[in-house]
Image: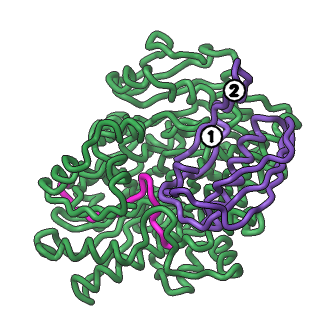
Amino acid sequence: MAYLFELVEAKPERWERIEITAPDREALLVDWLSELLCRATSNYNAYISFQVDEIDEHRLVARVGIVSAVAIDDIKAVTHHELAVRKCNDGWEAIVVFDV
Amino acid sequence: MYPIALADMQQIAPCTWEIPRSFRHDMRVNARLYASREMVEHLLAERSLEQLVNTATFPGVQEPVLAMPDIHQGYGFPIGGVVAVRAEDGVISPGGVGYDINCGVRLLASTTTHKDIGERLAALATQIQRNVPTGVGRSGRIKLSDEELDAVLDTGMHWAVTAGHASESDAELVEENGCFAAASADAVPERAKKRGIDQLGTLGAGNHFLEVQRVESIFDTERAKAFGLFEGQVTVLIHTGSRGLGHQTCTEYVRRMDQVMADYGITLPDRELSCAPFKAPEGQAYFHAMAAAANFAWCNRQVITHAVREAWRAVLGAHETLALVYDVSHNVAKLEEHGGVLCVVHRKGATRAFGPGHEDLPARYRKAGQPVFIPGSMGTASYVLSGTETAMQESFGSTCHGAGRQLSRRKAKETVVYDRLCRALHDAGIEVRAASAKGLIEEAPEAYKAVDQVVDVMAETGIAVKVARLRPIAIVKG
């Protein structure tokens, strides 16, 4: 989101609940990011705080903190191109390619 | 990864190369590339040819899959690719069209010359920038109701004519007359409509631009005359697409097809290639949605045209006109008959280039062949080409679409110096109106291949005929 918006120490004006389901965790990641992108560009919002309430391989439920903002940069879409999510020694590593 | 070496390719003509289907077990057809040897050597260092090979694995794919000389790495599909698939038992792939559905260009021809405009050029550039919303997050001047948006999606240029943004003759000079018969607003996801409803008549950012040009040279007098072009004439090139509506439509259908591919027994080397049988419900739904998004893109370019015409008259006088020469699509899938087979022709970063006599061409261009516009990078040149019979026989009636990137946006930002770029454009006599420095840097001339070389390859293969070369004199960018 820092790529899309120029925000300095903004605090959420309100919160929304987002629920995503997908066939696997890679698709879950793409769908989550796509959801944020769609909401951000349709509603002229920036999503700046995230509280994940539930997550597994197929489902994610989160609350997101919002401020009104117009994007300064453009992402067309979150692609499935060379998509990967894998566990590594000290956490998780993901490869997601954006169409810009 | 399947790296491709020069030894894997066969040179079958000076600018025609093939990767035979024996290269990889899952290829169903050969992969053909139109390029000079120098271009091929450059391409071997990146992954666009591997992406081309991946497209040769689609069920129902027709011989061969094609790469134009402006090919570069994309997402799943390469940009600059043409993939024809049998409609009867083949597939349709949203990624084969791309996120910016019906991104394309149109050329407007004035009746005036560069010399006549003289010092009014700066005022003209400023007025065009005022009239046409550019950049990220800019709404259009038109506020559509939900019903009006559906009319745009269902009827395309018919809506533009009815709403007073276009004449009947404008509509005749757009592929499909600006109205895809397959379009259905009902197939467009609601979220795509929401994302795009306030963007009609906006240029956007990225590589989209609006350019005032002068006709620098004419290569084919007869065809130039047919297209209404003459040396010294001022033209306007508009490059944009379906904006957020198209991006979201593609996003949602890539997702849907990713989820059903296994049900149809389809496995592919990259999830971004997700597809469904053309005749299956998912394939048909995407085709109807894509067609509707294409209608939106045509209307977008038309509303911008209307705004540019207003700017033109405001600065140069009420008598001045800008006639539409033609409007071509770069990212689209179309039902076309080739070699007696009904195909879904995916063009992603490629242009339809039908040859003389084709019944889908407007009557005024049927003798010359289809006009094709190849935008170069800003500060260099653009070309007007014409489709040929060779294109009909060899490339599913298709040619290249632009210069093709050679530097990523990140690389351009690292290497291009903004002040130097501005000075170079100014020294070349080009007025620049850009919404952001970043947008200008990313699209600097050095970020692109040499358009002259790309076009020369197409001319050498006989797939297109060079008609005219256009030099920019003013650029408006997001």
Give the structural element (helix, strand or loop) at label 2.
loop
The C terminus of chain B, quarter of image: bottom left
| Whether residue B96 can be seen here | yes
Q: In this view, does B199 lie to the left or right of B470?
A: right
Dot 1, crowdedness within 10 Å: few (<14), some or many (≥20)?
Answer: many
Query: Given the current orientation, which residue lies at the most extreme top position?
Result: B7
Q: Name the residue under label 2.
A: B269
Q: In this view, does B447 lie above or below B18?
A: below
Query: Given the current orientation, which residue lies at the most extreme bottom position?
Result: B318
Q: Residue A75: percent from the left, percent from the top?
A: 55, 51
Q: Residue B203: percent from the left, percent from the top?
A: 45, 65
Q: What residue type is labelled 1?
A: Ala
Closer to the chain start, of discs 2 and 1, is 1
Segment colored magenta: B201-217
In depth, the one of B210 and B451 nearer the eye is B210
Please report the residue visible at 38 percent of the width from the left and 29 percent of the height from the top: B35
Query: Given the current orientation, which residue lies at the most extreme right position?
Result: B263
Please report the residue visible at 36 percent of the width from the left and 59 percent of the height from the top: B436
Q: In this view, does B2 lie to the left or right of B451?
A: right
Chain identifier, purple in the render: A
**Distance in Å between CA atoms under marks 2 and 1:** 18 Å
The part of the image, by quadrant, that contains residue B156 is bottom right
Q: Name the residue under label 1.
A: B84
Please report the residue visible at 50 percent of the width from the left and 86 percent of the height from the top: B164
Q: Is residue A42 located in the magenta-colored stretch of the structure?
A: no
The part of the image, by quadrant, that contains residue B265 is top right
In depth, the one of B154 and B130 nearer the eye is B130
Q: Residue A96: percent from the left, percent from the top?
A: 63, 36
